[in-house]
Structure formats: C-alpha cells, structure tokens
Image: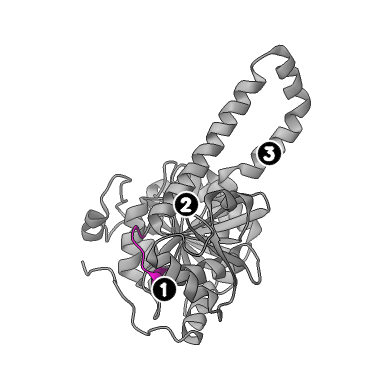
Amino acid sequence: MASKGIIALDAMGGDHAPASVINGANTAAERFPGLRWLLFGDEAKIAPLMKDAPLLAGKADIRHTPNRIADAERPSVALRTGRNSSMWQAIQAVRDGDAQAVVSGGNTGALMAISRHILRSPPGIFRPAIISFFPTARGETAMLDLGANIDCQTEHLVQFALMGALFARSVLGLPKPTVGLLNVGVEDVKGNDEIRAAAHRLREGGFPFVFHGFVEGTEVTAGAVDVVVSDGFSGNIALKMAEGTAVLYTHFLREAFRASWSAKIGYFFARRTLAQLRNRVDPRRYNGAVFAGLNGVVVKSHGSTDAFGFANAIGVAADMVEQGFMDEIRKECERLNWKTETAQQAPSV
C-alpha cells in the first residue's frame, strides 16, 4: 500500500528546476495542507531553497540523487543509464510504496519510458496514454492520447475512452462524462476500420460514461464532449494546433490594440476584461498531463512552466490520488472482464 498523502517530485526536471519545483510545491501545500513530499535531486541545490518554502517545513524529505536526465537525452539512453537520476528515483518511490504519485517537468520521452519500465500496466490495460485538459466554450475538456501511441488498434481506443472518463471524473469532477472519438466526420461511415470498430464497441454500452459518437476538430474547442479520444498522432497534432492558434490569436489582439491611439484608449477601458480572458486561457492553469494506464499516478508538467504552473500539475496528481483513480481503473477492468494479462510491456534494461 502506498503511503497516503505523499507526492514524489523530480526536483531537477524542468527549465527552471529546482526553484520552480520547490516554490510550486510550497504553493500547492496551501491548497493541500495534508500532503507530504519526497524531493529527489541535488541536495546542495534543493536545501537552500527550502528556506523560502515555509509550508514545506516538517513535511518534506530530500533524497539526494547525483544525476539528472537531460532534456535532449534519448529515452533508450535514459533507460540504460538513468538509475541514479532524480526522475528514476522519484518514479521508483511510487513503485516501492513510498509515495502515491510522481510529478516531473523533465524529458517527456524518458519519463514515459522509465515509468513504463518501473511501474508497468495494471491487468487489462494494454498501453498507457497521455491525458490532459484545456478550456473550451462549455468549460473544460480532457483529451487523449496526446502522443504516447502513434498507431492504435480498436482495443486501445476503447481503453483510452475508459481512462479518459475516469480522469474527467477525478480531475474535472464530472460524475458521468460524455466521450467522443475524434474523426474526420461525424457520419458512421467516416474514419478507418479501427475507429469505426471502436465506436461500435462503445455504443454497446456498459461503460461508466455516455458515448457521444464521432466528433470533428471544430467540436473539440466547442466543448461538444467532456472527453476526446484519439490516437497519439492525431491527438498531438490537434493539441499543438490549438496551442498555436491561441498564441496567434493573442498576437493579433496585441497588434490590434497597438494599431492606433483610439485602439490604445480602447485597451485602457477593456484591460480588466482582457485580463480575465488571459486568465481563462492561461496554459499554466491547465498544466499537468497524466500518463494513465500505469500502476501508479505519473504527472508530466510543462518543462518551461513556473511555480504557479507546477503547483497546478501537483494539484492534478493530488486530485487523482484523492479520488482513487488507480482503484477505479482496476475495478472497471474487472467489471468489464477484460483480459488479465497486459500486452506490450516495456523491455527489460
């Protein structure tokens, strides 16, 4: 059994680590005062920062690790040489029951590879998937897979739908979310064989969510469903396109308000509303992508985020632990009578 209320942090992962990690944990500690922390990394760099993190006093233990995994390091190299790294040791703390979740802003590929190798997948789940959420016209929508699985079979998409729904229940607080399959059209004849077969399986029912059917790209940002399911190739492209569009819109808006004196005066009167808009679409508020489908909660933070963003990634991990995300996956796999053996496990190192 995992130690209740303990989060393992890869303190050396991220562009601004370890400062962003320690300050982010201190911020998260205000929202989750019952949490305790395991900080993995260079003690000589972490310890001085603890003086400015009073909410962690008496609740955080530093576990010195001499190495860190570089952002450019290949996952295969990280698997062979990363045993003494802060990332590896933080993940291993979850496997050993010293923590219930791990949060890292480090190398995404290495984090996924090491997590799969150490934690494996629970019985019935074939592949882990990357889940995150973002703002839409109706609130917030979760989406998976965001890049872990380029090619997906029918069984994978069905399992992604289940994991995405349980994520939406845990993190977004939706008791029975609606789920849609991202496709090139909403008609039943659209899409490849795998996605049509997945839709057929999901329409049979028996799942803890409402299956909406197919959704197109324009319906994702409209909030037509609470969970969007896709293969990792399409999902990653869709997410990056949405992020790029948001940046482009901000650029156009800034240019428009600089175009003339009357525009600048208009900005003066509209600045409060614009501040609310910036806050609504601030990517730091939605930081924290989950590697679902593993025997443990693994959350990936944006490497470039600040303390506020990292605190929100910690919040995702804490919500999933509190809501029993892992137990729910195991219960649903048993209830659905899925295969007891897992497939495509990570190779031994």
Q: Position of residue 139 (x, y in %)?
A: 67, 54
On the image, numbered disc 1 is attached to which residue?
Answer: 295
Q: Earlier in the sequence, mark 1 or mark 2?
A: 1
Residue under the image location 26 percent in, 57 percent down: 82
Q: Residues within 10 Å of mark 1 (few under 14, many from 20)?
A: many
**23 over 331 or under it: above or below:** above
Badge 1 amino acid: Asn
C-alpha gap between disc 2 and disc 3: 23 Å
Q: What element carries label 3?
A: helix
Residues at marks 1 and 3 touching, judged by CB atoms closer than 8 Å:
no
| Residue closest to the eye, 302 or 308 | 302
C-alpha gap between disc 1 and disc 3: 38 Å
The numbered dot on residue 235 is none
Q: Earlier in the sequence, mark 1 or mark 3?
A: 3
On the image, numbered disc 2 is attached to which residue?
Answer: 301
Q: Residues within 10 Å of mark 3 (few under 14, many from 20)?
A: few
Badge 3 amino acid: Leu
Q: Where is residue 135 in the image (x, y as percent from the top left)?
A: 61, 50
On the image, numbered disc 3 is attached to which residue?
Answer: 277
Q: Is mark 1 on a helix, strand or loop?
A: loop
Q: Where is residue 265 in the image (x, y as percent from the top left)?
A: 75, 18
Badge 2 amino acid: Ser
